[in-house]
Amino acid sequence: MASVPKGFLRYYVLKLLKEKPMSGSEIMNEIEKRTDGHWKPSPGSIYPLIAWLQDKGYTEEVPKQEAGIKRYTLTDQGKAFLQEHVKRRGELRKKFEFLTPPFSRLPWFNCYPEKTRELVGAGKKLVMAGWSLLDSLREKYSDDIVKEATETLEQAAKKIEEITKKLKE
């Protein structure tokens, strides 16, 4: 990943430490895994951040379970700090929802028939609902919900592909 938005790494580390205690290397590996290998933060970015979070009282070291491995967890203050990040993230999402591809209000989209605005609105609702679902799953994960949502989206994608195919015939 060439450029990561300011504050994103802090948010990601807080989010991971809320899930379970982790070491710096475990955090780096988990971020790499969750970004499908597109981004692995460097030790030079992770360890100073962990130290800063600890200095601010947002994290604390957990008692060592394995020799030499320092793991960290969120404090109550850290959980509140994360919630503030989540709140700001939601506000930014709403503020910049117009950038959500492919249902954005970019100038090139205006060349389509007027009625496509309804499609754009429906697409934006779908994207926002998806973001909301993902945010909720961070708070309370459920395999059943993931399965149900995945099936619903796959059915919708299949139906849209069928509609597109009709247009091409």
Image (cartoon, grey):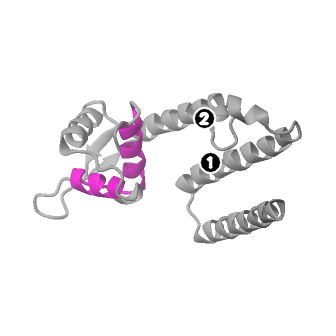
Name the residue beneath numbered marker 1. Answer: 131
**Marker disc for residue 4:** none
> Which secondary structure dominates the residues rendered in magenta?
helix
Q: Residue 57: where, in percent of width, then height?
A: 31, 34
Residue at image location 21% in from the left, 36% down from the top = 48
Residue at image location 19% in from the left, 63% down from the top = 65
Disc 1 and disc 2 in contact, CB within 8 angstroms: yes
Name the residue beneath numbered marker 2. Answer: 93
Vertically, is 155 above or below 89? Answer: below
Q: Quadrant of the N terminus?
A: top left
> Could you say which quadrant of the image residue 163 lies in?
bottom right
Q: Residue 87: where, in percent of width, then height?
A: 56, 34
Which residue is farthest front? 169
Residue at image location 69% in from the left, 28% down from the top = 107
Q: Earlier in the sequence, mark 1 or mark 2?
A: 2
Q: Residue 102: where, in percent of width, then height?
A: 66, 44
Vertically, is 64 above or below 154? Answer: above
Q: Residues within 10 Å of mark 2 (few under 14, many from 20)?
A: some
Which residue is farthest right? 115
Q: Is residue 113 magenta?
A: no
Q: Secondary structure at mark 2?
A: helix
| Structural distance between the alpha carbons of marks 1 and 2 | 9 Å
